[in-house]
Image (cartoon, grey):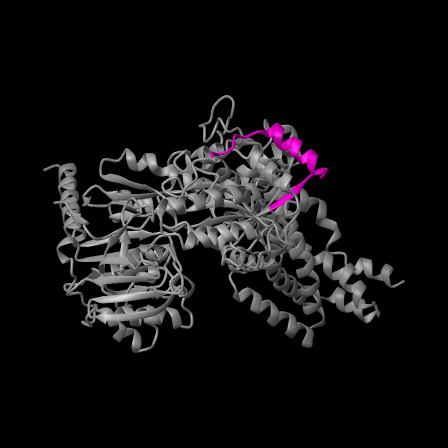
Amino acid sequence: MTAGTRMAVLAGVLALTMTSASAQTLSVALQDDPDTLDPAVGGTYSGRIVFDALCDKLVDINANLEIVPQLATEWSWNDANTELTLTLREGVTFHDGTPFDAEAVAANIERMQTLEDSRRRSELSPIVDVEVVDAQTVIFKLEQPFAPLLSVLTDRAGMMVSPTAAAEGGEFGAAPVCSGPYQFVERSARDFIRLEKFDGYWNADEIGYEGIEYQIIPDSTVRLSRLQAGDLDVAERIAPTDLETVRSNAQLELHTAPGLAVSHLFINVGEAGGILADSPELREAVELALDRNVINQVAFNGEFIPTNQMIPPSSAFHSASHPIPERDVEAARALIEASGVASPTIEITYENSLTDGRVAQIIQSLLQEAGFTVNLLPLETSSAIERYLAGNFELYIGNWSGRADPDPTLYTFFGTGGSQNLNGYSSPELDEVLISARSELDLDARKALYEEAAGIYLNDRPTIPLYHPTWFYGAQANVEGIEIYPDGLLRVTGLRPVE
Amino acid sequence: MSDATATPLAAPRGGNRPSALRRALGHPSTMIGLCIVVFFSLVAIFAPWLAPYDPNVSDWLSIRQAPSALHWFGTDDLGRDVLSRVIFGARASLAAGLIAVTIAIALGLPLGLIAGYFGGVLDMVISRFTDALLAVPFLVLAIALAAFLGPSLENAMIAIGVSAMPIFIRLTRGQVLSIKNEDYVTAVRALGVRDRSIIASHILPNILAPVVVQATITMAVAVLAEASLAFLGLGQRPPAPSWGSMLDIARQFLTEAPWMAVWPGLAIIAIVLGFNLLGDGLNDTLNPHGEGD
């Protein structure tokens, strides 16, 4: 045996041992460290990925954003659309052995509505009473119809935690107990989260891995190279510029889904706003000077979806009658002249990430061609968010993760008093449309209302939507069953190693 | 009267100055270092004439193109000419080095002189303050200050300058301590010369050599620190180029567009090497202990 063959054999043996070891545990790279693992409090996208393995929800969505059963097998509205009756799955237990039943649902809703630092309170505020009919039946009572309720229950507000564990006090998020396919083992902040298979899971046949290790790897280049090296099974948010590398590698597979998220140029139209605040002409000039295709091509290799709306084309509520306006630099110049502002200067604040930095510089370059002077203010994440929440910005590159239902996006941003309405925008006309859309359960009638809403906000321009990111997961080809939905979560049910 | 008497007593310095300078220039590493530094200084000064393109203007049709006859160093992720950005980036780097070191000396030298010359409580306070600053690693202190001041090239310079200050306090104080009891100092003090003019005319000129050497070496550190801060997004504001921020963006494209990283990386290596060679050479020739050989 020559030295070369010996090395090759050794490498082969090493590779074999490594695959058989990792076949048991799925290692997943996350870009950010999730915040607390308590579904009542959690507020991060990466946290939602972990919750998918840890905590089952009452209902889920499918690839077409339709509501499908999870812990609730059936549901129905009463005639007035004010009572939602849920039939619960039988034989479900939490990780600590507590049975899952109607009492547990009632306790969870109460917990999320009353817990001091609950972030689910406003999402669940339409529920005024929970009636336990029998062990498998529960009724949510509302004061008035609220169409987005089921959609709300497909996310953290619908995640059921063990009432026994929650009642014990202490910090629940440090050792969460739910009823999902995997249970919590340990966590090291900014490093990893380890879960192991829960043998009592109701759908255990569909669970193919003994455990999951989520590793926190903020740099997308590092995630990719570790995926290429084979020490990761799945990596989320592959950079659009790296997709070719994944596509051309036979060992790897790329899984994508058009996202619900939207990145937009949020304009302060309130008192803290600059020259754009009082000038609809200048806001229109900004939009006309932009070229969303250039942003998409240059910053994202053309892999994202350019947009002029907050609701993505994958949603039934996207307005088809409002196409993206063509770039028109001459018209933009004319509007600047009409506005009477001699040399308009604007400032864009953004989180100092590579993506937003690139987008900001492209916007700067495009707007300068139309006669704007654009200053850029990149800030470190926490100070950027602080300014954002305080409404202390002229323009801000906002990144909104989106929701399956249009209401939590449109009302929070454009409704007077909405939680993301930080730019001082208020339109009584739009408020009325959005509120009536909440109580409309008929799909076509709701679509018509959101069509009307799109007409209003696209004309007022409290923000200029830019693009919808597409979700890109890179994975080893031997991980079978990965399917990414528009919410961008890695669903662990149905995943298994291929031998 | 006192000045006339003082001059001959302070004689050791004046006589060998020209030969020290000549010897410094004759030292090979000083020469190489000086050439590199002068080269980059000229590049920075004449950037607008040397750069083939505007460093901030994008060509949307040539994104991340490899080096070619049109773009010698290739183009970056926004279709900007990398050569032009490296040329203009020299301005940020050299300005940061120069101004940061000036700040460090302007703050550090007087404090060191006071601490060393007067001693006592003043020395106690200044020295403990210096110890406290030196306890924090240089770059960590600079990052903390820059993050506190907010991202801009000016703030990065201030942050680097303040972080580099303690080494100058300590160096100056040590030098002053070693000469303040020399005969010529004692003599002028005995003649009743005021402290201020003793420091200015007799102490300062005799301690400058090590400070100059330290300043040159600190320049290298400051240039590297500016690149590090820019890499972390705490330096030059976009779109103006800086070698550090160019590297920060380039690291995303290491496999598909390595030229984006190579050129600013080489530039940083070259300028830091230049300052270090210059510093080493000056140290060999200006160091008082080396004077006899």
> Which of the image's four quarters has the N terminus of chain A?
top left
| x, y percent for residue A8 | 16, 39
Instruction: Give the vertical position of A140 relative to B20 (above or below).
Output: below
Q: Residue at x 26, y 71 (%)?
A: A132
Q: Residue at x 70, y 34 (%)?
A: A337
Comparing A391 with B165, the one in front is A391
The quadrant in which residue A250 appears is top left
Q: Residue at x 66, y 67 (%)?
A: B177
Comparing A353 with A414, the one in front is A414
Instruction: Give the vertical position of A410 relative to A114 (above or below).
Output: above
Comparing B150 with A386, the one in front is A386
Query: Which residue is at the far right?
Result: B1
Residue B244 visible from this viewpoint? no
Horizontal side, residue A343 vs residue A103: left or right: right
Instruction: Give the vertical position of A128 relative to B84 (above or below).
Output: below
Query: Which residue is at the far top?
Result: B69
Instruction: Give the vertical position of A458 relative to A426 (above or below).
Output: above
Query: Which residue is at the far front?
Result: A79
Horizontal side, residue A85 vs residue B114: left or right: left
| x, y percent for residue B127 | 62, 70
Residue A254 within the magenta-colored segment of the rendering: no
Residue A337 within the magenta-colored segment of the rendering: yes
| x, y percent for residue A68 | 25, 52
In the image, which residues are magenta? A323-347
Comparing A452 with B195, the one in front is A452
Q: How many marks?
A: 0
> Which of the image's four quarters has the C terminus of chain A?
top left
Residue A160 visible from this viewpoint? yes
